[in-house]
Image (cartoon, rainbow, N blue to C red):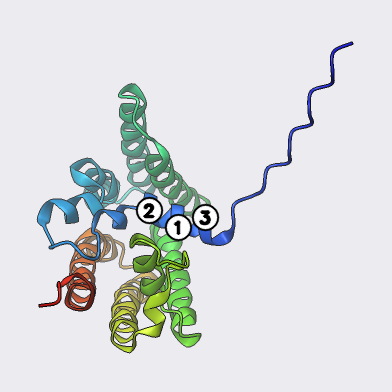
Amino acid sequence: MPAAAPAAEPSVPPSFSAQFRDAVQNAGIARVAPGEAPSGRALLGAVGGVRGLAESVLPGFAFLVVYAITKELVPSVVIPVAVGLVFVVLRLLQRQSVTMSFAGILGVAVSAGLALITGRAESNFIPGIVINAVWLVGLLITLAIRWPLIGLVVGFLLPANEDGSHVDWRADPVKRRVLTVATWIWVGLFAVRLAVEVPLYLTAQVELLAGLKLILGVPLYAAVLWVTWLLVRTVFVRRDDVAPV
C-alpha cells in the first residue's frame, strides 16, 4: 500500500510589512528611486506613462467637454465611463495588466452612479473629494505618531539594512526631518484640492470644478512628486551615496 502523501503545510499569510513593501514597489512612485538623479522619463513612468496620463485625464476631460456643451447629466457621466472601458479593452487586447485601468473605471462608474442617483452633476465629484479627505487624514495621522508616510514609502524603496529593517532612517535626525517635511508637502496637496473643490461642489459650479479638478490632478501630483524626489535625494545622496575621501 503506497504511503500517504505528506499533508501540505498551511501557507503563512504575508506580514503587513511584506504586503506594504510589495504595494510600494508595485506602485508608480517606485519608478522614482530615492538615490537616483531626477529625470523626466522616470517621472513620466511614475504617473503611468503616456497611456496612464491619458487614462487619468481623458474621462474627466470628456465630462467637462460634454457637460459644457450639452448641460445634460446622462451623456456627461456615461461618456467618461465609455472612455474608461475603451482603455480597459485595449489593455486586454494587448495582454497588459488591467489592474489600474479597472481601478480607474470603477472610480468613474461610482462617480457616474452617484450623479445619476442624485440627479446632480456635482455629485460626480463626491468620490474624489472623499478620497482626498481620507488621504489628508491618513497623512496627518502618520505625522502625529511620528511615522511620516513618505518615510515609510522611501524606506521600502531602498534596500533593507543588515537587520532587514527598512526604517533605519528614523535614527537619523536629518533624514527624519526631510521625510517629515516631504510628508507635509503631500498634506498640502490634498488640503489644496479640498480647499478648492469643496466650495465649488457646495455651490454647484460644475464646469469650474471639473476644470480645476483636472489641473489639481495629474499636473499637481507630478509637481509634488518631483519636489519630494528632489528633497529626499539630497539627504540620501549626501549622507549615503557619497564615497568618503
Residue positioned 29% across, 46% down in the render: 59
C-alpha span from label 1 to label 2 = 6 Å
Residue positioned 19% across, 62% down in the render: 219
Kind of residue indicated by mark 2: Gln
Whole-percent x and y of residue 1? Answer: 90, 10
Kind of residue indicated by mark 3: Gln
Whole-percent x and y of residue 48? Answer: 26, 48
Q: Which mark is residue 60?
A: none
- The answer to whether residue 195 of the structure is visible from this angle is no
- The answer to whether residue 135 of the structure is visible from this angle is yes
**Please, is residue 138 above or below residue 117 in the view?**
below
Q: Residues within 10 Å of mark 3 (few under 14, many from 20)?
A: few
In the foreground, 47 or 114: 47
**Please, is residue 3 above or below residue 222 in the view?**
above
Residue extending farthest to the right is: 1
Q: Quadrant of the C terminus?
A: bottom left
1 and 2 marks in contact (CB < 8 Å): yes
C-alpha span from label 1 to label 3 = 5 Å
Position of residue 118 in the picture relative to residue 215 (left or right): right
Residue under label 2, please give it: 25
Residue extending farthest to the top is: 1
In the foreground, 126 or 150: 150
Q: Residue 169's image quarter?
A: bottom left
Residue positioned 39% across, 36% down in the render: 98
Q: Please, what secondary structure does the residue beneath circle 2 have?
A: helix
Whole-percent x and y of residue 50? Answer: 18, 43
Q: Please, what secondary structure does the residue beneath circle 3 have?
A: helix
Residue under label 1, please give it: 21
1 and 3 marks in contact (CB < 8 Å): yes
The tag earlier along the polypeptide, 3 or 2, is: 3
Q: Which mark is residue 19?
A: 3
